[in-house]
Amino acid sequence: MLSGEVKAFIHLGGNIVRAVPDWPRIEEAWKRLRLTVNIATKLNRSHVVHGQVAYLLPCLGRIEIDQQASGPQAVSMESSIAHFHGSRGQVRPAGPNLRSEPAIIAGIAKATLAPNPKVPWDDWVGDYAKVRHAIEETWPATFKGLNAKMFDPGGIIRPLAARERKWNTRTGKANFIAPTQLFAGDMGTFGQPGVFQLVTFRSNDQFNTTVYGFDDRFRGVKGTRMVVFMNPDDLAENGLRDGDFVDLTGVIEDGVERRVDGFRIVAYAIPKGCVGAYFPEANALVPLNHHDRQAKTPAYKATPVRISRSAVTHIEQPERMRP
C-alpha cells in the first residue's frame, strides 16, 4: 500500500486500519487505494476511511438464520482452547437482501475465476456441510468427524501433540532452545538510558479492536483508555507521579516520527523498564518494520519508546481513536 504496488483490498471482517502497526501511515495509504471492499456486520474505522472506489457489503451475522438451498446452515469455529464446535443462527436476518460470507466470497470467485470442477462454488454455498467435508478430506488428522461431532458437548478437541505430552521432535523429547536475542523485536535499544519497552494489551471490555467500554476491571481503570502503566520505581527515578500526563515517542530511527500524546500515568506492577498501554491506541508507536524476523508478527509486546511530560492536563479520548 505504501509503495503503491497494491491497488485493491478485499477485507473480510476486522478493522485493519486500527489493528495494524504504524496506523497513521497505513490510513493515508489506504485512502490512496483504487478499490477497497469491506465485508462486515458492523461499521468500524476501516469503513469510513476508504479507497477511491469503495464497497461496503453488509453480510449475515452468526446470530442470524442463514437459509440456503439445503436449508438453514450451521458454521464451525475454533474456541480459544482449541475446540471446534458448531453454531446456528437463531434470529431473523436484519434485511431480506443480506448474504452470508460464504455466498459473497463464492460469488466473487465465480465472477472472476474460470470454472473448476474441483471447486463447486454453488454446491458449497448451498450446503456448508460440503465445505466441511472437503476440509475433513484435506486434513483428516485434524478435522476427522467435524460434520458429525461439531454439535457434541465440547465439540471436537483439536489435536495438539504438546497438550498430550507428545513431542514430535528428532529426539522424541521437548527441546529447549536458547534465544539469540532478548525478545522478538530487539533492535539494540534495550537498556538505553530513558528508553522503555512498550507492551500493548487489551482491556477486559474489548474484543480485538472492538472496544465496548472505557472501564478495565482487570487493572482498575475507569473512564478512559488513554493511560500508560508504569512501575513505581521508574516513576520515582524519572520524577513522575501517578496521575501525571505524559507523551510517548518512538525511539527507532527510520525517518518517521511516531508520537502519541496525552497518556495519564497509572502506577502498576509492571516490570521495571517496561510500560504498558492499550491496543489499538498505542499502535501508532509500533513501526511496520519492527517485527519478529521469521513470523513477521508486529512487535506489539516490545517497542522502545521515550516518555516526556505532556501539555495535556486532563483525560481526553480522541474522537479519531474511537472504534
Image (cartoon, grey):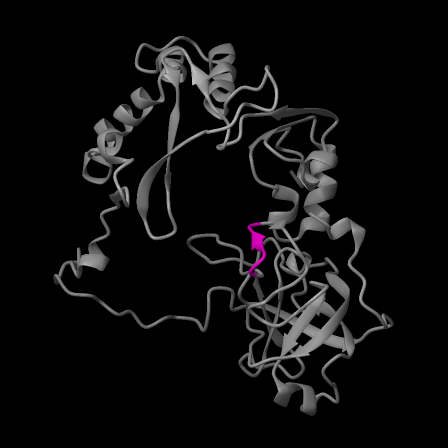
Q: Quadrant of the N terminus?
A: top right
Judge whether 145 appears above or below 102 on screen. Answer: below
Q: Is residue 213 left or right of residue 125?
A: right
Identify the residue shown where x is 25% and y is 38%: 152
Residue 7 within the magenta-colored segment of the rendering: no
Identify the residue shown where x is 26% and y is 24%: 133
Q: Is residue 34 left or right of residue 82?
A: right
Quadrant in the picture for residue 190: bottom right
Residue 169, given in percent of the width and then of the height, sits at 17, 58
Nearer-the-camera pick, 152 or 83: 152
Total marks shown come to: 0
Secondary structure mostly seen in magenta is: loop
Which region is colored magenta? 204-208
Residue 191, given in percent of the width and then of the height, sits at 57, 81
Identify the residue shown where x is 42% and y is 54%: 294
Judge whether 141 appears above or below 242 on screen. Answer: above
Q: Is residue 317 left or right of residue 117?
A: right
Note whether residue 258 is visible.
yes
Note whether residue 250 is visible.
no
Quadrant in the picture for residue 70: top left
Residue 242, given in percent of the width and then of the height, sits at 72, 82
Nearer-the-camera pick, 272 or 88: 88
Identify the residue shown where x is 52% and y is 17%: 108
